[in-house]
C-alpha cells in the first residue's frame, strides 16, 4: 500500500481553500485589494503547485476573515490598518453582491437555505456552527461543483474493506487481490470508492495509519478532494476505558461524564477518528434488553442530563477544536422500548409516552448541539425509525431545529425490506432518504439506487442535494478540510495520565446494595485489614477482557488491572494473605472448581465473590430472558455462603440482575457493572474504604424477571395496592388490586437507591412558594417558578458523598401522571455531622407534562415534592398551581 501511495500524484491541495483565503486576506490587508478580487477564476501558485480556484470558494470565508482583527495585526502599514480593513470588507461585500446578482437564481440564493427553514417557521437551528452563513456559502460553492455520483458518494458509508488497492481490479491483478483480501459482504472496495469521490465516511476504521491511508486517497486522488469523516463506536473510552454508560449513569455526575468524554475524544482523534457513534441515549425500562448497558437507564431526566454531558465532552464549544469530535446521538428513536426486551424488536407506544419518557434525552443532546443523529433499527408505532418522517423530519428537524445530518444504523436502510415496508432496494432507499436519513451506513443501497431514482424522476435532486449539504456542513464545521489527517502522537494504549480519572469514574459508579452488620455490630464493608486471610473467588475475579464491557472502543486487554491483581497488591501493603480460586466459568455447568473454591473460602476470614455476566451477555444482540446469575454461579454462591464465612458479593453486569436470594443471604452486595481499565484498583479502593461508595441505581433491580418492565415512575392505576402487604399472597380484601399473586410490586432495589459507608438524614423539605398562578407557570418557560430545599446531614462518622434527589408528583391533571418523577439531583459531599441546605429550582420543564394534543403544558393542579436519597424518598412538601378563577375566589 505504501508503494501505491508514493506513486506520483497530482499536487496535493490540502487546505487549498484556506491557503487561498490566507493569501488573499493578507494581500488585502497590506496591498491593493483590487488585485485580489479582479479575476473570478483565479490561478494561484501554492507550495504544492498551481491551483485554480473559483472566486466563490474564497470570497465568503474572506469576508469573515476581514472581520477578524488578527488578519491585520501584522500589516506593515499600521496606521492605515482600520481603513484597509473597512476598505477590504466593503469591497468584498460589493463584489459579493454584484456577482451574486449576476447569478440566475440570485434571489433564491439570497434567501435562508431551505434546510434551515422549518416548514412552520419554528425551531432555532440546534447547532450554531452548522448554521454559520459563511460555512453555508462554502457548502453551496462545493455542492455546485459536484456531479451526481460525487454527491451520492457523500451519503455512503462503509467500513474498512481491507482492500490493498484503490485501483479498479485489472485482469492480471484481480486474482491476486481477491486471494489476499476476501471481498466484503457488500462487494465494494472502499479504497476505490474513496479515491474516486464515491465514499463520504467510514466506520470503525481505526488507527492513524489506516485512516490516513484512506484519507490520502480521498484528499489526494478524488476530483474534489473532499475528506472522509471517520466514525467509530467509542462508547466509554477509546484506549483508556471507563465504566459502561449504565455504570457511569450511576455516578449521577454529569461533569465527570463530560471530562471522560473529552478524554476519549482527545485519545481517538490521534487515531484519525473525528466522529463518535455516541451517546446512546435510549431509555430502557426492561433489563432483558442487552443494550440497557449502553444507556443511562430508565429515567428521562437523568438520561437527558447524561446526554448533554456527553455532547459537551465530545464537541466542546467548537467542533473544529483539536481533540473534539462530532457526536452521533443514537438510536433515534425509542429503540430501548423493544417489546419483551428482545433485540431489534418492535416498539409501540402512545405519542404522549414517547414525548414524556423517551424523547427527552435525544432532545437534550440535540439542543446541546449534537452534530449528527443515528436512526434506529426498530419500528415505532408501525413505521421503521429509519424511514420515519414523523421522527426524522417533523420532530427532529421541525420541532427541535436539528441541523446536522442523520446516519442510518448499520444496514438499517436495507432492513426496511425485512420490515416489509419496501419490496425492493429502490423503494427502501426512497423511503429512507425522503424520511430524513442522509447517510446510508453499510446497506449498499444509496450508492446503487439513488442514481436510478434521480434519473427516473422518482426522487427530486433537491432531496439528494439537501442530504449532501447536511453532510458537508459537518465536514466543514469539524475543520476536516483544513486538518484531514490524524494529528499528534497516536494513542495506542491506555494513557497513564488518564488512569486516575477512569479510576475515579469507576469508584463513583459502584452501587452498594447491601451492607449488613455482622455479629460484632459493624457492617462488613469497608473491609477491615484485621481480616487477615481474604479469599477471592469467582469467574470475574481475574478476568481482563470482561472488565471493559461491551463496546470497549480500542481498549487493550493488557492495560487492564483485574481485581486479583489489585487485591494482591493490597495484601502486600497490608501484610494480609490473598487466596484465590476461579470456582467456575461465567456460563459454565461443571462444578469441578467448587471444591477448591470452598477450600479457599473455609481457610479465609472473609470471602469476596466476583460473579456476574460476561461483557458479551449485554450490548447489541445481548437480550436475555432470565436475569439470574448465568451458568452455575448461583450454586457456587449458595455453596460459599453455606461455608458460614462473611461474603462480599460483587456483581459485574451490564444490566440489573435478579438478586433476590443474595439479598436474603449475603451481608454485603455491591454492583460494579463493567468498570473499565482500572477495574481492580477502583474496586479495591472502595472495598477497603479509601473511597466511600456514592453510586445510585439508574435502573430498578427487580425481584423477579416477570416484573419487567419495572420502573419507578409508573402510573398509579385505578387500584393501587396502597397499604397492602404484598409479600403475602392475596386473600380476603387484598386480591382485586394492581398486584402480583407471587411477588411484591416493588423493586428489590429501587431507582436512585445506593448505600454509603456513612449515612445521611433529610429534614425540612420546604418550597419557596405554596401556590403559583397558572399564567405565571405558563410564561417564561426557562425560568424557575419555585425552589425546593431540604437540609441534608451526614449522620455517619466519615466524609462521604450523597446524591440528593428531588422527585415531583402532579395530581389532578387532565392526563394521568406518574407516581413520581425525578426532576433534579445533586452530588453533595459532607463531613461527619455536617448539614447543608440543598435546593432544586423547579420550572416549566420540571413541572409540565404532555397533554392530549401532545403539547407540554401546566394545568391548575396539585404537586408533591420529595427530596431524599432514592426514589423512595419520604420527606415531602406540597404546592399548587392555581387558575385565575381560583385566585379570584381567594379575594
Ligand atoms: C449498532 C450501532 C453502531 C453501529 C456501528 C450497529 O449495529 O446498532 O449502535 O453504532 O452498528 O458500529
Image: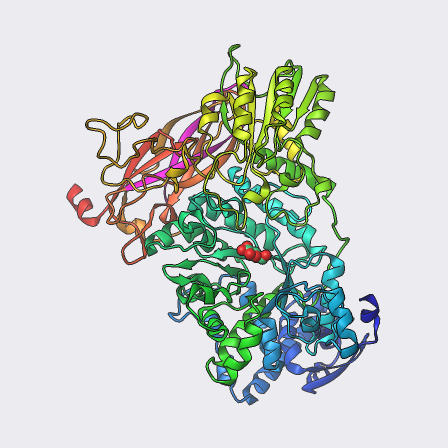
Q: Is residue 332 left or right of residue 843?
A: right
Q: Residue at x 42, y 44 (%)?
A: 285
Residue 639 seen in the figure: yes
Q: Quadrant of the C terminus?
A: top left
State the residue at coordinates (83%, 74%). Answer: 7
Position of residue 506 relative to residue 663, above or below, is below
Does the rendering let one see residue 830? no
Question: Any magenta on residue 206?
Answer: no
Please determine whether, in this image, residue 98 is positioned above or below residue 698.
below
Q: How many marks?
A: 0
- Queried whether the magenta region covers residue 797, the answer comes back as yes
Q: Quadrant of residue 355?
A: bottom left
Q: Image height check: is 846 above or below 217?
A: above
Looking at the image, which residue sits at the far top? Answer: 520
> Is 353 placed left or right of 325 in the picture?
left
Residue at 32 percent of width and 50 percent of height: 849
Left/right placement of residue 505 relative to residue 577 reads left
Q: Nearer the viewer, residue 214 or 593?
A: 593
Q: Is residue 505 above or below residue 358?
A: above
The rendered magenta stretch, by its main secondary structure, is classed as: strand
Counting from the top left corner in percent of width and height, residue 571 is at: 71, 21
In which quadrant of this rendering is ligand 1 seen?
bottom right
Give the percent coordinates (x, y) of residue 570: 70, 24
State which quarter of the image contains the N terminus: bottom right
**Nearest the camera: 696 or 445?**
445
Residue 346 position, x and y percent, is 41, 55
User: Relative to residue 714, is residue 799 drawn left or right?
Assistant: right
- x%, y% of residue 21? 70, 74
Residue at (38, 36) in percent of width and height: 788
Q: Which residues are magenta?
A: 785-810
Q: In the picture, residue 36 is in which quadrant?
A: bottom right
Amino acid at each position: 500500500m505504501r508503494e501505491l501511495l508514493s506513486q506520483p500524484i497530482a499536487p496535493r491541495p490540502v487546505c487549498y481553500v484556506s491557503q487561498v483565503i490566507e493569501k488573499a486576506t493578507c494581500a488585502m490587508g497590506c496591498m491593493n485589494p483590487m488585485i485580489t478580487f479582479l479575476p473570478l477564476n483565479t490561478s494561484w501558485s501554492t507550495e504544492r503547485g498551481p491551483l485554480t480556484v473559483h472566486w466563490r470558494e474564497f470570497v465568503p470565508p474572506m469576508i469573515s476573515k476581514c472581520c477578524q482583527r488578527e488578519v491585520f495585526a501584522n500589516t506593515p502599514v499600521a496606521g492605515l490598518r482600520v481603513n484597509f480593513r473597512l476598505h477590504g470588507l466593503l469591497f468584498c461585500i460589493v463584489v459579493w453582491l454584484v456577482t451574486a446578482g449576476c447569478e440566475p437564481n440570485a434571489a433564491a440564493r439570497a434567501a435562508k437555505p431551505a434546510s434551515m427553514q422549518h416548514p412552520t417557521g419554528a425551531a432555532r437551528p440546534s447547532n450554531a456552527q452548522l448554521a454559520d452563513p459563511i460555512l453555508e456559502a462554502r457548502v453551496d460553492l462545493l455542492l455546485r461543483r459536484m456531479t451526481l455520483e460525487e454527491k451520492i458518494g457523500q451519503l455512503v458509508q462503509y467500513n474498512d474493506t481491507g482492500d490493498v488497492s484503490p485501483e479498479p481490479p485489472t485482469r492480471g491483478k484481480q486474482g491476486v487481490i481477491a486471494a489476499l483480501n476476501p471481498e466484503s459482504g457488500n462487494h465494494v472496495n472502499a479504497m476505490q470508492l474513496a479515491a474516486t469521490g464515491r465514499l463520504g465516511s467510514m466506520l470503525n476504521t481505526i488507527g492513524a495509519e489506516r485512516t490516513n491511508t484512506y484519507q490520502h486517497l480521498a484528499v489526494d486522488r478524488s476530483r474534489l478532494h473532499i475528506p472522509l469523516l471517520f466514525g467509530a463506536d467509542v462508547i466509554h473510552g477509546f484506549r483508556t476505558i471507563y465504566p459502561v454508560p449504565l455504570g457511569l449513569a450511576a455516578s449521577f455526575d454529569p461533569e465527570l461524564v463530560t471530562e471522560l468524554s473529552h478524554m476519549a475524544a482527545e485519545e481517538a482523534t490521534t487515531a484519525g477518528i473525528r466522529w463518535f457513534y455516541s451517546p446512546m441515549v435510549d431509555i430502557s425500562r426492561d433489563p432483558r434488553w442487552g443494550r440497557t448497558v449502553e444507556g443511562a437507564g430508565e429515567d428521562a431526566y437523568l438520561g437527558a442530563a447524561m446526554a448533554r454531558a456527553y455532547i459537551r465532552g465530545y464537541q466542546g464549544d467548537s467542533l473544529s477544536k483539536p481533540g473534539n469530535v462530532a457526536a452521533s446521538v443514537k438510536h433515534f428513536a425509542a429503540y430501548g422500548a423493544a417489546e419483551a426486551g428482545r433485540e431489534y424488536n418492535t416498539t409501540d407506544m402512545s405519542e404522549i409516552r414517547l414525548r414524556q419518557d423517551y424523547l427527552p434525552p435525544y432532545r437534550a443532546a440535540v439542543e446541546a448541539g449534537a452534530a449528527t443523529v443515528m436512526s434506529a433499527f426498530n419500528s415505532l408505532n408501525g413505521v421503521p425509525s429509519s424511514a420515519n418522517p414523523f421522527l426524522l423530519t417533523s420532530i427532529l428537524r421541525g420541532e427541535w431545529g436539528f441541523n446536522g445530518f442523520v446516519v442510518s444504523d448499520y444496514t438499517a436502510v436495507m432492513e426496511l425490506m425485512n420490515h416489509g415496508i419496501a419490496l425492493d432496494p429502490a423503494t427502501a432507499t426512497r423511503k429512507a432518504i425522503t424520511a430524513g436519513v442522509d447517510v446510508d451506513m453499510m446497506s449498499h443501497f444509496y450508492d446503487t439506487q439513488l442514481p436510478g431514482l434521480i434519473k427516473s424522476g422518482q426522487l427530486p435532486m433537491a432531496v439528494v442535494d439537501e442530504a449532501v449539504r447536511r453532510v458537508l456542513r459537518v465536514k466543514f464545521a469539524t475543520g476536516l478540510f483544513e486538518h484531514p489527517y490524524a494529528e499528534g502522537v497516536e494513542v495506542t494504549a491506555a494513557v497513564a495520565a488518564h488512569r486516575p480519572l477512569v479510576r475515579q469514574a469507576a469508584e463513583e459508579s459502584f452501587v452498594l446494595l447491601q451492607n449488613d452488620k455482622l455479629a460484632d455490630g459493624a457492617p462488613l464493608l469497608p473491609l477491615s485489614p484485621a481480616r487477615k486471610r481474604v479469599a477471592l473467588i469467582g469467574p470475574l475475579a481475574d478476568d481482563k477482557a470482561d472488565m471493559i464491557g461491551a463496546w470497549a472502543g480500542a481498549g487493550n486487554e493488557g492495560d487492564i488491572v483485574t481485581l486479583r491483581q489489585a487485591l494482591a497488591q493490597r495484601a502486600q501493603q497490608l501484610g494480609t494473605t490473598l487466596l484465590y480460586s476461579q470456582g467456575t466459568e461465567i456460563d459454565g455447568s461443571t462444578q469441578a472448581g467448587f471444591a477448591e473454591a470452598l477450600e479457599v473460602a473455609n481457610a479465609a476470614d472473609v470471602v469476596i465473590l466476583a460473579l456476574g455476566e460476561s461483557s458479551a451477555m449485554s450490548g447489541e444482540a445481548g437480550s436475555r430472558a432470565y436475569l439470574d446469575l448465568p451458568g452455575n454461579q448461583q450454586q457456587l454462591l449458595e455453596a460459599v455462603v453455606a461455608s458460614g464465612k462473611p461474603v462480599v458479593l460483587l456483581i459485574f453486569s451490564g444490566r440489573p440482575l435478579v438478586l433476590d436470594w443474595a439479598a436474603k443471604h449475603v451481608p454485603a452486595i455491591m454492583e460494579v457493572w463493567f468498570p473499565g481499565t482500572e477495574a481492580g484498583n477502583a474496586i479495591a479502593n472502595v472495598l477497603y474504604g479509601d473511597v466511600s461508595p456514592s453510586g445510585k441505581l439508574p435502573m430498578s433491580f427487580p425481584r423477579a424477571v416477570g416484573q419487567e418492565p419495572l420502573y419507578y415512575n409508573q402510573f398509579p392505576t385505578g387500584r393501587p395496592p396502597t397499604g397492602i402487604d404484598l409479600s403475602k399472597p392475596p386473600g380476603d380484601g387484598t386480591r382485586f388490586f394492581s398486584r402480583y399473586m407471587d411477588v411484591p410490586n416493588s423493586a428489590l432495589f429501587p431507582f436512585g437507591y445506593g448505600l454509603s459507608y456513612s449515612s445521611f438524614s433529610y429534614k425540612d423539605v420546604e418550597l419557596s412558594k405554596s401556590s403559583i398562578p397558572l399564567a405565571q407557570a405558563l410564561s417564561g418557560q426557562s425560568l424557575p417558578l419555585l425552589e425546593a430545599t431540604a437540609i441534608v446531614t451526614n449522620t455517619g462518622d466519615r466524609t462521604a458523598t450523597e446524591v440528593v434527589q428531588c422527585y415531583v408528583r402532579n395530581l389532578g391533571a387532565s392526563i394521568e401522571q406518574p407516581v413520581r418523577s425525578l426532576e433534579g439531583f445533586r452530588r453533595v459531599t459532607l463531613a461527619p455531622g455536617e448539614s447543608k441546605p440543598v435546593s432544586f429550582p423547579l420550572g416549566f420543564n420540571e413541572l409540565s407534562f404532555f397533554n392530549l394534543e401532545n403539547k407540554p403544558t401546566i394545568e391548575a393542579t396539585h404537586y408533591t415534592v420529595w427530596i431524599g436519597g432514592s426514589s423512595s424518598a419520604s420527606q415531602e412538601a406540597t404546592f399548587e398551581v392555581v387558575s385565575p378563577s381560583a385566585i379570584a375566589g381567594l379575594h
